[in-house]
Image: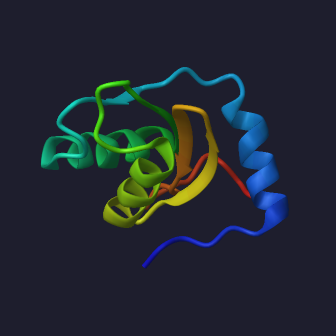
Amino acid sequence: MELALNSKQRAYLRSLCNTLQPVLYIGKDGITDNTVTEAWNVLEARELIKCSVQREAPLTAREACAALCEKTHAAPVQCIGSKFCIYRPRRKDPTIILP
């Protein structure tokens, strides 16, 4: 159950991503259960997060984004170089209101 965004919503979220710093790093172990748990918790707190894939990681940023979105039921927003952003609204009282 992946969240679907239209182009206007994605553009709005991309504009919010520009000022974010990466809060989740994917290293040489790839996406582990701990990574998924951490991503889930951070998404519940912030709704929109930026992640970074380290050089030693076995995945590319696009692969990591797709895998993390699938496991956290989030939507991919943007993937540039080794960084990507994902979005999932909070269950209660979402703070980011999409157009």
Quarter of the rendering containing residue 20 = top right
Q: Nearer the viewer, residue 92 or 20?
A: 20
Looking at the picture, how far across and down is residue 26, in whole percent?
32, 33
Say which residue appears at 35% left-offset and 44% top-offset: 59
* Relative to 44, residue 72 above or below: below
Q: Is residue 3 left or right of residue 24?
A: right
**Residue 99 seen in the current view:** no
Looking at the picture, how far across and down is residue 2, in whole percent?
48, 73
Say which residue appears at 76% left-offset and 69% top-offset: 6
Q: Is residue 34 left or right of residue 85?
A: left
Quadrant containing the C terminus is bottom right
Q: How many marks are shown on the rendered structure? A: 0
Q: Nearer the viewer, residue 57 or 77?
A: 57
Q: Nearer the viewer, residue 59 or 9?
A: 59
Quadrant containing the N terminus is bottom left
Looking at the picture, how far across and down is residue 49, in whole percent?
51, 38
**Residue 47 seen in the current view:** yes
Say which residue appears at 24% left-offset and 46% top-offset: 31
